[in-house]
Amino acid sequence: MPRMARRASSEGTQWDLSSAQAKALCMVRRGGAILAPWKLASSDRTFGLDLQEHRNSGILWLDAPSEAGHAVELFAATPARLETELERMPIPPRAVFLSPLSDPFHGPEEAQSDAVLCTELLARRGITTWIRTRGRIACRLRDRLAALGDRVRVTIPLSTTITSLVRQLEPGTTAPMARLRQVDRLKAAGVPTLVSLDPLVMGIHDRQERLIPLLKVLVERGIQQVTAGYLALPEGCRARLIGLFGTEEANRIQGEYRFGPVTALPSGAVARLLPRAVRQRAYARLAGLGAGEGISVHVCRWANPDFTDKPENEPAEKPRSLRDRWQEALEAAGRN
């Protein structure tokens, strides 16, 4: 780790890293409860716990172009406050999604340490922690995660093997091969680890010449199943799309979403999904390509909330009239 100089600031404490590639770390205060119900989970006892202040919708490559240069704004005293909150809860959580609106392992090791401390605290209480990261987990922190057994589950998102595409669309994250090496190390250490193909952009990530090499690399590493999810396109991101892809390609991408349903992202931002039928065909194609390579592709439930929604107040069966019941009673009497 690079050496750090620490100085006080009006908002908290600031660390300046000597490496130009490393992020500065700033401690900030927050009020209110730190555990929030995670609405995308199927269980009422699943909560989200954010470790960092988030400036955006949680989709790195649709944020401001300079986002990768911002300091990591870490909430102060999160492990201590988490322990206090858990002691006051009458029914403990079943699972906690760690830092769902930001990457818990995106930043210097001091920021990552809080993520592991919270995970250890939850594990001691029998609570499973879900972690999703595109960052690089420090070796000593990986060993601490491994000691928790099945009380921690790590997901590594990976949408392509092309490093230049990752640098363009996911600035500040680790390269594809570095993520794959991290998957290998986590699995070798005994940490339950999954790979997800997301967020996929139709016509960019799911082109056969790009998807097949990715599937082959995963199979070579012994990965037999993955989840996949297409991007939920936030409202108001047109300028960013044009900056990344140009006007023509931006128009094509937005056109794909034109008739899709509107949904709310965990951050509260409004986004649009691809039309349901379009996603169904796309996932069927992904599943077919995966089967051809020996890997099972499952649909990510969180990326497709409308796939699991059930109509409210739907009767279990059609109500029967008194006449119907009388007729049934006569028929039963005749049979007897």
Image (cartoon, grey):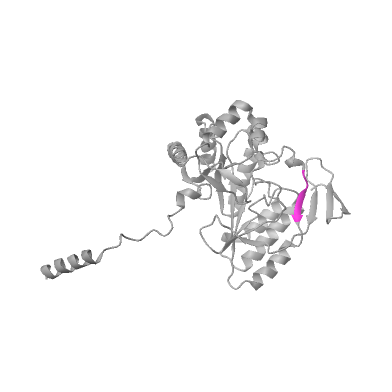
Q: Tell me which residue sits at (59%, 69%) in the image.
A: 92
Q: Position of residue 120 (x, y in %)?
A: 66, 63
- Dividing the picture into quadrants, the one containing residue 38 is bottom right
- Residue 235 appears in the rendering: yes
**Residue 71: in magenta span:** yes
Residue 237 falls left or right of residue 94: right
Q: Tell me which residue sits at (77%, 41%) in the image.
A: 69
> Predominant secondary structure in magenta?
strand
Q: Position of residue 85 (x, y in %)?
A: 67, 68
Q: Position of residue 82 (x, y in %)?
A: 69, 65
Q: Tell me which residue sits at (56%, 33%) in the image.
A: 253
Residue 217 falls left or right of residue 57: left
**Residue 329: in magenta span:** no
As rendered, which of 175 and 232 lies closer to the eye? 232
As rendered, which of 137 and 81 lies closer to the eye? 81
Tell me which segment is drawn in magenta: 70-74
- Residue 222 appears in the rendering: no
Q: Tell me which residue sits at (84%, 48%) in the image.
A: 16
